[in-house]
Amino acid sequence: MYGLRCQKTAKPVPLKEIDVHVDIIGYVSNVTSSLEYHNGEDNPIEAVFVFPLDETSAVYKFEALIEGRRIIGKVKEKQKAREEYDDAIASGEGAFLFEEDDRAGDVFKCSVGNLPPKTSATIQLSYVAELPVEADSSLKFVLPGVLNPRYSSDTGAAAYDDTYIVPGDVVTSGAPYKLKLKVNVSSPNSIDKIESPKASVDVAYGGTSAQVTLKDGHKFDSDVELYVYYKDKHRPFAVTELGQGTDGFMADHTVMLTFVPDLSREDLVANCGEFIFILDRSGSMSGNKIKDARETLLLFLKSLPIGCYFNIVGFGSSHQSLFKGSQQYDNKSLKTACKALGKMEADLGGTEILQPLQYVYKQPPIAGHPRQLFLLTDGEVWDTRACVSEVAKHADSARCFSVGIGEGASTALVKGVARAGRGKAEFVSGTDRLQAKVMRLLSCALQPTVTGVGLTWQLPNGVTAVPIPSTPPPIFSGDRFIMYAQLQGQLPVDVTEASVTLSGRVLTEEIKHTLDLTLKTQDQEMPSADDGPEPQQLHRLAAKTLVKELEVNLEKDNGDSEKVSDSAKKQIIDLSGAANVVSKFTSFIGVDSEREEPIQGAMMRRNIRPPMMLACMGAPVMLRCAAAPMALSYDECDSPAYGSCLDEVYDDCDMALYSADHEEVMSLETEEKKEGMASRIVGGVVGLFSGPKTKKKARAMPRKMAMAARPMGGGFGAGVAAAMDDEEGEDSAPPSTVIPLQMAEGSWELDDDLAAVLGVKLDRLTKECPVQKKAVWATVLALVWLHTKMADKKVEWQMLARKATTWLKAHQEGWSADDVVGKACTVLGAKVDPSAVLG
């Protein structure tokens, strides 16, 4: 974790403590964060705290408590709020401003201006959010703690503006503030368990409720993640939240609808399509990220249906396409792709996502093969709105699925392009496996598009439903489908039964799912103005959903243009104000106008860096950059090759690694020394800048060093190397699993490579073969091995296994599944049910 200290006084920045209270009710979380500031200096200060927050979160409350006075923030148009803040500061008044970053909807800035000397202030922030459902059906709550540097194409560097880094501030290890967290969980369903893979927590269960507390001493150096497991988790439901007031958005009753459609039949799985995998190969993907990406791509390639089309586009400062145009999927194209896959490194410089997206969309479509894009990135970019706009423009001709890798991945980018592209987003962090998440998305992509999706309501006379969003989100089998609606009109006083039906069409089959609603009015005690806004969780979430839809429509219509129609902007501002939910065009502003006398003295700015501004888990180091031959910290370099130099070591130059105290310099002059340092660099440094003192285009690290730096432990990384032909003619590493050996049509060949993985000599496998066609025997052996050795990773390989099963059924002549599978189990010393192999 990193914090800042004032260079002149060496005093810590003024944020002392973050106290977070969370209420998880069903599938929704309500979060209240209290931030305690203290100014121990002799002058008034401005404390600025920048932090990440999921872009779909609805921030609805912002207030401050200072010297016994309570200042409630109000939502106002962003420019007016900034002007009011500046005017208050100039007048010697205290002021508080909370706003969304202009460039990305998941970065927020909290400013406490004119905090008097020797004075404390507490800022309270409240927001609501939907909880995403993981592959194991758990609900995931994340308290973000990581904000990574983001690449800007305008400057050619991964740099922050003065919001984030101010010259003169000194980076120090050790956080100047601590975190307290308490979570209350309640649900109509019983709670199975609650887990936190990285944080140390205490959990007290009570049937349908639970309390979670963070143990003392927690270091806020990563995201805090909680996984909540409910019983009866797939049950669809509807919840009605009553309105408050007499008119406007918050006065109408709001309904949250949750469906879990089941479209898992094999005849509803597509066997066609154009699958384009857009892989981030920028420098920030170095180390385990690119290793996992290679393994994932291998699984992805092996799981594609025979006869489809595919391509891989890697991007960084530039982009590279595996094929000039998508190729038909067969053994020849698969072999070419696997050969290229083993050589893919994070060696393409900065992070330019827009250009590869534009390149892909310009490619002519392939008749009869719907286009499916898979964007895989750590999301460290600023131009998210331009990327979302580009995807939105082509949503009718291509679905877009996205994966955010690592803590700090931009939710604005990853969720934004998936929402705009009518696809689905996943995030990988902590102990998550990238392979499982991508396979889940591929499963969704192989499902035909559900068309004609709509809601049919049965409501009392005089009551109408307005759906939010106006265009229903896409439907995927087994995936939670959520929509909101506002009920307009007078509801009867008595309890009223109503219903809503979700309908659509998959290929030639019509689908319908009906939910019953219970509508009941009751007297509401309206809160006084001093109480601030009540949670009204569903209303806030519905408002935020509608705001996001309106913003996507603006981006689709205007692209990356700064000009936005006044009417469209006003619609968002009005909705934001009515629901008290901040948006890209609005901010919270509060002014301490009740102070009896102006605050005296020249105000000084103090920036508070969020935990893990950089996703570097090693000790702080100082590096020398090719673009800037002076020693500087790795997060201050403005080189266009930001973060890429770990995989871009020049053959004809030295690279110098500086110790944190600026004293020792270790010069690596020979290839042998470079190879020896590779493993040390991978574990502790995000990016290593190297090269001659004059700039020149970065190029890939020497192959020997690339192999030395490549982590091969865990997963099936050795299989990636085995799936390619070594460019220098060396023997490739033996495969660690059967996965790299699978053919495009789904079968395996009975050869030495398969025998090596199975651990049985080829002569014996050949002798024991119970069928005439050896490929059938090899395929059964491979499937039995997968069910035995990789049972815990079935979600990753079940699609390629399904393809193998289909191939076996097409060649099931003169042999019995019981006999062949039984024989395979005997040879391999395994125990697998034949139905698991052949269905």
Image (cartoon, grey):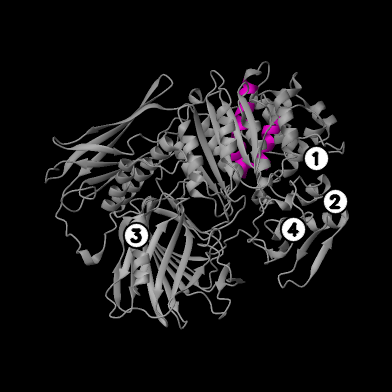
Decide if residue 226 is on the left or right side of residue 657: left
Contact flag, marks 3 and 2 (Cβ < 8 Å): no
Q: Nearer the viewer, mark 4 or mark 1?
A: 4
SS for callout 3: helix
The answer to whether the residue labelled 2 contacts the one labelled 1, judged by CB atoms less than 8 Å apart, is: no
Does label 4 or label 1 sit earlier along the sequence? 4
Answer yes or no: do the residues labelled 1 and 3 have beta carbons within 8 Å? Answer: no
Q: Looking at the figure, which quarter contains the N terminus?
A: bottom right
Horizontal and vertical percent position of residue 216: 50, 73
Front residue of 132 and 342: 342
Q: Position of residue 331 (x, y in %)?
A: 71, 24
Earlier in the chain: of badge 3 and badge 2, it is 3
Bounds of the magenta span?
Answer: 781-809
Residue sitting at x 70%, y 66% = 621
Tell me residue 91's x, y (percent): 34, 72
Residue 835 visible (yes or no): no
Residue occupying the point 40% across, 21% down: 509
Please say whether residue 321 is one of the residues in the magenta stretch.
Answer: no
| Sequence order check, earlier mark of 2 and 1 | 2
> In the rendered image, which quarter contains the C terminus?
top right
Upstream in sequence: badge 4 or badge 3: 3
Res 197 label: none
Label 1 belongs to which residue?
734
Q: Main secondary structure of the magenta part?
A: helix
Which residue is labeled 3 in the image? 81
